[in-house]
Image (spheres, coloured by chain):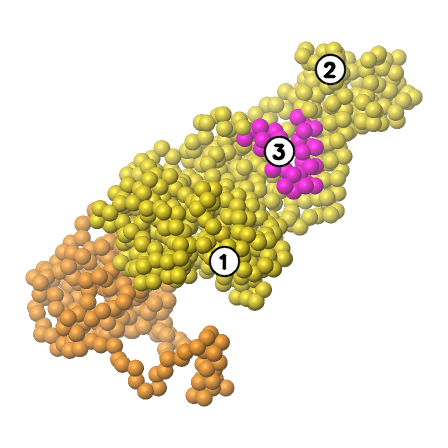
Chain colours: A yellow, B orange
Amino acid sequence: MDIVGPAQFVVLGIKTQIFSILIPVVALVLFAYIISKRLIPLRRAAQDERFNRFGERLAQIWSLWLLQVKQPRYMLAGVLHMAIFFGFLVLMLRSIALVFIGFQDDFQWPFLGGSLGVGYTIAKDYAATVVLVACVIAGIRRGVVKPPRYAVPEQYGKDHTGEAVFVLALISLLMISESLFDASKLATGGEAGHFAAPLSLAWFFTGMLRGSSTELLQGIHIVSYYVHDLTFFYFLCFLPFGKHFHVLTSFFNVLFMRLDRGKVKPVRYGLAKEELDELESFGVKKLEDFTWKHMLDFYSCADCGRCSDQCPANAVKRPLSPRFITIKARDLLFKTFPVWGQPQEAPALIGGIYTEDEIWSCTTCGACEEECPLAIEYIDKIVDLRRGLIDEGMVPQSLQKPLNALERRGNPYGKTAKQRGKWIEEEEFAQAVPVKLLQGGETADTLFFVDSVGSYDDRIIEINRKAAQLLHHMDKDFGILGEQEKDAGNEIRRFGEEMLFQEIKEHNTEAILEVAPQEIVTTDPHTFNTLCRDYEGLPPVRHISQVLVEGLAQGKFSLRPLEEKDLVYTYHDPCYLGRHNLLYDEPRQLLDALPGMKRVEMEKHRDRSFCCSGGGLALFYEPEEETRMGVVRVQMAREAGADVLVTACPFCLINMEDAVKIAGLENELKVIDLTELFAEQVEFVPTVAAAV
Amino acid sequence: MNILVCVKRVPDSSENEIRLNREGNDIDTDDLVYAVNEWDNYAVEEAIQLVDKVGGSVTVVSIGTEENEEILRREMAMGAETGVLLSDPLFEEADGRKLAAILSAYISKNNFDLVLCGAQADEGGAQVGGMLAAMQDKPYAALVNMIEVLDDNKLKIGREIEGGSQEISEIELPCVLSIQTGINEPRYVSIRGIRKVASVEIPTLGAADIGFTDVPLRLNKLEYFQPELGEGAEMLEGSEEELADKLVELLQAKGGIK
C-alpha cells in the first residue's frame, strides 16, 4: 500500500492539509511583522548613498556573497560555512517546494521537470548531507573545541555559544526531517524513477526504513513533514533575533557595501561644505545618527570574530574589539526598537555602550574591514563617532595639543611654518641636491609633498633627503611648498576634526594648484592616501615607491649589491599603502631589484599586515594597552627570521624603531625605510655621491 | 551662580624660539602665535562645570585689543555665555596692579558671585588674582585645584600645598579664586564650535564705560635675558651609554641617588 502525503493525510478526522496552509500563512504574517519592526530604525537613520554603481555592486555580490571569497581566509570555519551556504542555496528551491507539497501532494517546480528534476534531486540530497555533516563538525567546533576567537570577554557580556549551537541544531533538524520525509516514501518501494542519491542522508535513511510497516512509514512521513515545516518557519522568524539575521541581510549588506578603499564618508550625505556649519549636531552621538547602511551592518554581523582576531588594537589589549562595536550596537538596536512594543529612548552611545577610549583606540588600519566576509564597515563608524566626540569637546588631552597646534600652525608639533622648508637648506645637501622652493610664482613639474613628519622630524628628514636625491637623479624637475604647505590632514579627518580638515584641505589645494604641477609625489602613505582619496581636483599623486619602480623600468638606476650578504630582509606593508591603496607589489619589486636581496615574508603580510600603531595624530594618543603594537610587529619580523625590517612609511619607521628598543632587539633587528635602503644601493653621479 | 573668568591672551611659547626685542627688555612678538593662557582655560572649564551643576552663567573677560576676541570666542565655544572685551588706549601699558585695577573696575559695575583667574600667566607674576581680591575686598584663595558648591553662600575648595599635601577650606561667596591646572580636563574646542559663536556680539568696554581711572605703573621691566651658564652647569658629551654612566656617576656624587 502506498502512503499519502500531508495534503491528503487525515488525522482524527481532520485533513492535515489545513496545517500545511495555516503554518506558512501565520508564519509569513509574523515574519512580515518582525521585519517591518526591524526596518523602523533604518527608516529613522541618517542618509546614505548606496543606490548607485550597480555594476560594481553586482560584481561584489558575485565574489563576496555568492563565491564567498573571504571565507577560506579562515580555512576550517570558511569551508564549513561555504558548505552550509551552498547547501542552503541548493535547498532553497526544495524547501519552498515542500511548503507547496503540503497543499498538493504531487507539486513540483514546472521548470524542474525531466532529467533536470532528477539532477536537482541528486543535488539536493547531497546538499542536505553535506550541510548536516558541516553542522555536526561546526557544532563540535563551537561546543567542544571552542576556538578562542569566539570567547566573549567579561566586559562585553555573556558567552554566545548557546545561540550558535542552537542554530546548528535547527539546521541539522531541517536536514534530517527533509531527508526522512523523502526516505519514508522511498522505503515503501516507491515509484519508478524515484531514488535517493547513493550515500546521501536520504539514501541511508531509506536503507534503514526499508521493510518497516506502512503505518510506521506513513507516520514518519507526516511527522517529518511537519517537523520540517515548523522548524523551517520557526527558523525564518527566529533569524531576525540574533546573529543569524545575516542569513537574510547578507545579500543586501554586500550589495550596498562601501566600494571605495581609503575614503571616509562625508559628515552627512548631500550637504555642501557651507551647510555643515549649520548642522545642529555633528557626527554620531546616538543610534539614529548612524546611516541606514551602518545599521544594516549591525544586523548583518555573524559574530564570527574575524575582525577582532585581526584587530591590532584588540591584540595589544586596548579597550577596543571591532566585533563588539557591532554586537553592542546591534543589541542596543534590538532593545531600543523591540519587535513587541514601542520604540524606546536610547542612551547616548558614548557612556552608554561605548567608552571614549574605545573609540580613540582605533588606528584606522582597516584590518577588520579587510577580513569581514560580510563587508561590514568600521572606519566610517569610528570616524563618525569621533566627529561626535570632537563636537562635544570630549577629546583626550594628549590629542588636544597636536590638534590645537594643527589649527594654529598647520602641523601637530607646534613648530613654526618658517621651519617647514628648512630641511632643504642644510649646506652639504643643498649643494648636492637642488630642491626648488615653490613660493612666489616658482613652479615645477613634480611637487614633492613632504607633510609634517617629513618636514620636522630629524629621522624622517633624512629619508626625505634621500627621496629628493633619487628624484634629482631621475632628472625630475621638482620642488616643495615650504611654508605654504600644511599638514595633509589624513588623521585630522580620521580623528574626526572635519572642519579643521576642510580648512587645511582648502589651503593646501590652493597652494598646490598655484604651483600647477603635473604630478605630486610623497614618501608618506598617509599623505598619499588623503591626497588621493580626500582631496579633489589635484594632479595625479604617486607614492615614492611607484616613482622608483618606474625609474627602475626606465633603467635609471644602477644598483650596487647589498654589502652584507647574510642579512635577511622582510617588508612590512604600511596600512595606508597596502590595505587602503593596494600598493603591495611596488615596494617588493624595489627590494627584489637590489642585487643580493634575501627576503622573507612575515606570516601577517600584504592585506593581513599588522599595524605598527598608527600615524599622524595616533602617534600622540596615549592608549591603555598591555604592549605596543610596534613591539608585537617587530617580534613577528624576528619570528620570520628577518634581520632587517623594511617599511615605506615614516610612522611605521618611527614606531618600529622605538619598538625595537623597547623589545630589546637592537642587536638583532634593524628597521629601515625602503627609500633609504634603495638609495644606499644606487650609484649616484660621482659629485652627488661624494657630497651626500 | 554668576561666574566671571578673567582670561589673558598670551604667546603660545611651547615650541617657539624666543627672541629678544631690540630694547632687550622683552621678547620679540612679531612671529608669535597667540593662544589663551593655559591656566585660564582650566578656570573657564571649571566655571562651566559649576554652572552645569548649580545653574547660572559664565562670563569671560579679557583686557587687550580686538585681537583678544579670538580667545574670547574660543572660551565662548567651550560654553561661556558672554564674552566681554576691555579695550582702551589707556590699558595698553599695564603692570599686574593696573590689570587688577581695570578688572576691579569692571567687576564693580557688575554683579558676580564668583571670580576665577588662572593661577598665573605667561610672565609668571601670579599677582592679578590676589590684588583683584584685595581691591574688591573679597576673600581669596590661590592655586585652587578643587571646587565644590556647599550652598548659595559657601564653597568648599581644595588647594595643593607644597609636597603634594592637600588643604581643604571653606570660603564665603562672593570670592576670588586663582585656579591651578589639573583641576579638570578642559574640553576640546572644535573649529565648528568656534564658528558657531563667530557672529555673537562681544561688547567692548573702554575706561569710561567701566569707570576706570588710570593708576600709575609701579613696576617697569628693565632687562630680559637668558642667564649665562654658571658654575656647576655642565654639558655632558659622548654616546648614549657614556652619557648615562656619567649622569649616574654625577648624581651619586652629588647625593641625588644612593
Which of marks 3 and 1 precedes in the sequence? 3
The mark lying in front, picked from 1 and 2, is 1
Which of marks 2 and 3 precedes in the sequence? 3
User: Would you name the residue on which mark 1 appears?
Assistant: A672
- Mark 2 Cα within 10 Å, few/some/many (few <14, many 20+)? some
User: Would you name the residue on which mark 3 appears?
Assistant: A68
In the picture as drawn, the residue positioned furthest to the front comes out as A686
Residue B213: x, y in percent? 7, 68
Q: Quadrant of the C terminus of chain A?
A: bottom left
Residue B177: x, y in percent? 28, 69
User: Would you name the residue on which mark 2 appears?
Assistant: A117
Residue type, numbered disc 1: Ile
- Mark 1 Cα within 10 Å, few/some/many (few <14, many 20+)? many
Measure the C-alpha gap from mark 1 to mark 2. 64 Å
* Helix, strand or loop under label 2: helix
Which is nearer the eye, A491 or A675?
A675
* Helix, strand or loop under label 3: loop
Residue type, numbered disc 2: Gly
Judge whether A222 appears above or below B230 on screen: above
Which chain does the numbered disc 3 sit on? A
Residue A69 part of the magenta segment: yes
Tell me where the magenta segment starts and ends, as one range: A60-89
Measure the C-alpha gap from mark 3 to mark 2. 27 Å
Q: Magenta region, mostly helix, strand or loop?
A: helix
